[in-house]
Image (spheres, rainbow, N blue to C red):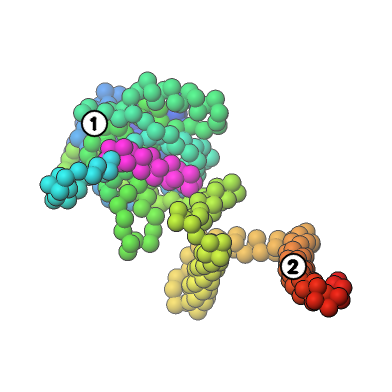
């Protein structure tokens, strides 16, 4: 590390890039002028890194843009579900006293799970694509380093462009012990990210129960401390992930739902998505109208995003889009007509069979032949 801009009560710490570390975040700490004396060296910075830690719910000032893929959320949720089912097996059917004791006992807390998140960083954009599990020792609050290095080597062979961006865990909030794991991964990534999934169910919550933290060095009560700060993120998907998530969301229920039930659920989901899109477009339209009338100040960043979105619309009116749309529309109509003809043919065959049976019985009585 190196030190620069000492004076006026502010010190900037710049992290020197190394080929093995992917994500670099400049960290600044505010120090009173009377506390700056003499020369600082690497040992001073190491002391800052090993100082006491706290958790703070402030927003990140790094300026990074995080994109999280659904596969990471599914992996963390699956990891938590498997560990929870293994650690809390269903109680066997025993005597009444055992059942009463089990019902009166307090519920067991959900075990925490740990793992690494991998992805790529392009400039100021960090994209988290995948994750893998890690072995954790709760007594020492440490990870199995040999297991981590082995998994990293295996993933490097399959995904050579992916790097370890940080780690993940489960829980309602970041804990003090999480900083020990965070520091242990700093030799792999100088500023790792921390993805936290809250497994508790909150029906009133509309957002995803996922929080991304970054670490920043702050001076609190004159003591330099490494703390967690919240970072905003967006959900990014590719075509394969959209198909997989849609398939998981519309799996046939275990009680054997009918095809009509699945179709109704599918159409309900599409209707909800269109309704949500319409409401968001209305909000954006009202916001732009208020901005045009001068009721609210102009926000250039939002206007650039709206302009970028509108520039995509003419691409939908291209000749290729119309040809593809008409082809798909005609294929759908052809399938509908074919299904209608098949149904009519089946009904006609049933009618012919009934007439043949009726004339066959009449011919046995009076000697007349079958109608068809």
Magenta-drawn stretch, dominant element (helix, strand or loop): helix
Name the residue at 22% across, 39% down: 176
| Image quarter hosting the C terminus | bottom right
List x then y, in percent, for residue 63. Answer: 43, 47
Whichever of labels 1 and 2 marks the residue nearer the N terminus, that label is: 1
Name the residue at 53% across, 61% down: 258
The label on residue 346 is 2
List x then y, in percent, for residue 194. Answer: 36, 40
Q: Is residue 31 visible?
A: no
**Does dot 1 land on a helix, a strand or a loop?**
loop
List x then y, in percent, for residue 320. Answer: 78, 59
The label on residue 138 is 1
Q: Is residue 73 magenta?
A: yes
The label on residue 313 is none
**Distance Cα–Cα, label 1 vs label 2:** 67 Å
Is residue 57 shown above or below 150? below
Extent of the magenta region: 68-88
Q: Is residue 156 magenta?
A: no
**Does dot 2 land on a helix, a strand or a loop?**
helix
Query: Residue 354 or 89: which is nearer the viewer?
Result: 354
Q: For this view, does 77 lie left or right of residue 309?
A: left
């Amino acid at each position: 590390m190196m030190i620069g801009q000492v004076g006026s009560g502010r010190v900037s710490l710049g992290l020197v890039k190394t080929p093995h570390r992917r994500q670099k975040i400049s960290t600044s700490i505010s120090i009173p002028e009377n506390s700056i004396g003499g020369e600082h060296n690497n040992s001073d910075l190491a002391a800052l890194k090993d100082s006491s830690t706290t958790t703070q719910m402030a927003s990140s000032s790094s300026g990074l843009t995080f994109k999280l893929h659904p596969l990471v959320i599914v992996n963390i949720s699956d990891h938590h579900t498997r560990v929870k089912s293994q650690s809390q097996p269903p109680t066997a059917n025993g005597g009444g006293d055992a059942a009463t004791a089990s019902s009166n006992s307090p519920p067991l807390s959900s075990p925490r799970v740990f793992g690494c998140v991998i992805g790529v960083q392009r400039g100021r954009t960090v994209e988290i694509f995948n994750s893998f599990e890690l072995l954790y020792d709760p007594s020492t609050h440490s990870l199995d380093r040999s297991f981590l290095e082995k998994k990293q080597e295996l993933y490097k062979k399959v995904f050579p462009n992916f790097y370890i961006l940080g780690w993940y865990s489960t829980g309602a909030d970041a804990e003090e012990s999480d900083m020990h794991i965070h520091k242990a991964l700093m030799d792999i990534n100088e500023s790792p990210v921390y993805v936290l999934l809250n497994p508790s169910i909150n029906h009133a919550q509309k957002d995803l129960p996922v929080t991304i933290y970054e670490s920043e060095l702050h001076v609190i009560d004159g003591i330099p401390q490494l703390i967690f700060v919240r970072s905003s993120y967006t959900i990014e998907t590719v075509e394969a992930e959209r198909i997989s998530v849609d398939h998981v969301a519309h799996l046939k229920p275990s009680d054997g739902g009918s095809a009509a039930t699945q179709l109704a659920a599918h159409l309900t989901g599409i209707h909800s998505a269109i309704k949500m899109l319409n409401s968001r477009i209305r909000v954006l339209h009202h916001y732009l109208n208020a901005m045009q009338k001068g009721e609210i100040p102009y926000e250039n960043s939002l206007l650039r995003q709206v302009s970028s979105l509108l520039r995509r619309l003419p691409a939908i009116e291209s000749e290729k889009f119309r040809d593809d749309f008409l082809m798909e529309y005609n294929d759908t109509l052809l399938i509908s007509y074919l299904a209608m003809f098949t149904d009519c043919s089946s009904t006609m065959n049933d009618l012919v069979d009934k007439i043949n049976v009726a004339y066959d019985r009449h011919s046995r009585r009076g000697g007349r032949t079958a109608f068809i």
